[in-house]
Image (cartoon, grey):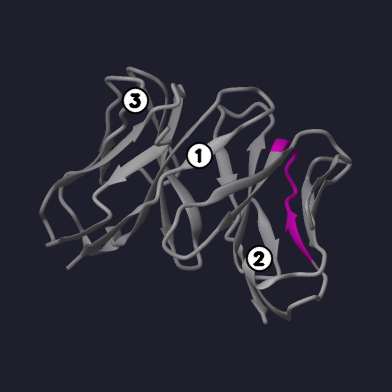
Amino acid sequence: TQLLEQSPQFLSIQEGENLTVYCNSSSVFSSLQWYRQEPGEGPVLLVTVVTGGEVKKLKRLTFQFGDARKDSSLHITAAQPGDTGLYLCAGALTGANSKLTFGKGITLSVRP
Amino acid sequence: NAGVTQTPKFQVLKTGQSMTLQCAQDMNHEYMSWYRQDPGMGLRLIHYSVGAGITDQGEVPNGYNVSRSTTEDFPLRLLSAAPSQTSVYFCASRTEGLSSYEQYFGPGTRLTVT
């Protein structure tokens, strides 16, 4: 059973479109992170959210942590080909021994 | 500032061979981890360390050993490689904190076991 479920698994959109992807769980997390990974490289941290209901913006990317700290969403406005990549969410369980659990990722392709 | 470095970048092993994947970080992070990434499986934690001399098992530790003699280095050893260990391996280090984790990944080692 996957602790963190990411959806959709694959997404292909046209440049300029908006999109929202999700990271869901039945567990409560003390913090949740989003990473982007490009082919042949390691994941790169985009954001960490720690407070229920928290919203963080990174240019055209908007991240939200659910009020109950069980889920998160990533919204991209006016997607660009440079946004193409694998988006991973990772959560730290409340009370766990500092271990991060990763979802399987969302593969995003933005067509020019 | 090199961040997290991994060597080698690519490796091909025969079944039964042993090898060590190297990982080093220059950010003075206490916490280091090894993950493997397989298609459709996401990142899975192999072993981790919360400081020099302290290591613990992750989700998929079988077939791998680690040690942490210094803060900077965290090598991963495959004692007897198996085809099931074909994967991309990532080392990561991060700051420590109850609610904030700034984790940095290395570029990865792509391992093929034949």
Observer-side mark, 1 or 2, equals 2
Element under label 2?
helix
Judging by the rendered image, the residue that carries numbered circle 3 is B72
Check the residue under mark 3 and report the chain it is in: B
Check the residue under mark 1 and report the chain it is in: B
Q: Are marks 3 and 1 on the same chain?
A: yes
Count of numbered marks: 3
Within 10 Å of the Cα at label 3, are there few (<14), some (14-19), or many (20+) other Cα atoms? some
Residue B100 at x, y = what percent? 67, 29
Within 10 Å of the Cα at label 2, are there few (<14), some (14-19), or many (20+) other Cα atoms? some
Instruction: Residue type at mark 2: give it.
Output: Asp
Looking at the picture, tell me which residue is in the foreground, B94 or A23: B94
Instruction: Residue type at mark 3: give it.
Output: Glu
The answer to whether residue A46 is left or right of residue B67 is: right
Look at the image and say whether residue A23 sits in the magenta stretch.
yes
Of helix, strand and loop, which mostly describes the magenta segment? strand
Is A43 above or below relative to B24?
Answer: below
Is A15 above or below relative to B46?
Answer: below
- Name the quadrant of the C terminus of chain A: bottom right
Magenta-tinted stretch: A20-31
Is A60 above or below relative to A16?
Answer: above
Is A30 above or below relative to A10?
Answer: above
Judging by the rendered image, the residue that carries numbered circle 1 is B104
Looking at the picture, tell me which residue is in the foreground, B25 or A50: B25
How far apart are the alpha carbons under marks 1 and 2? 20 Å
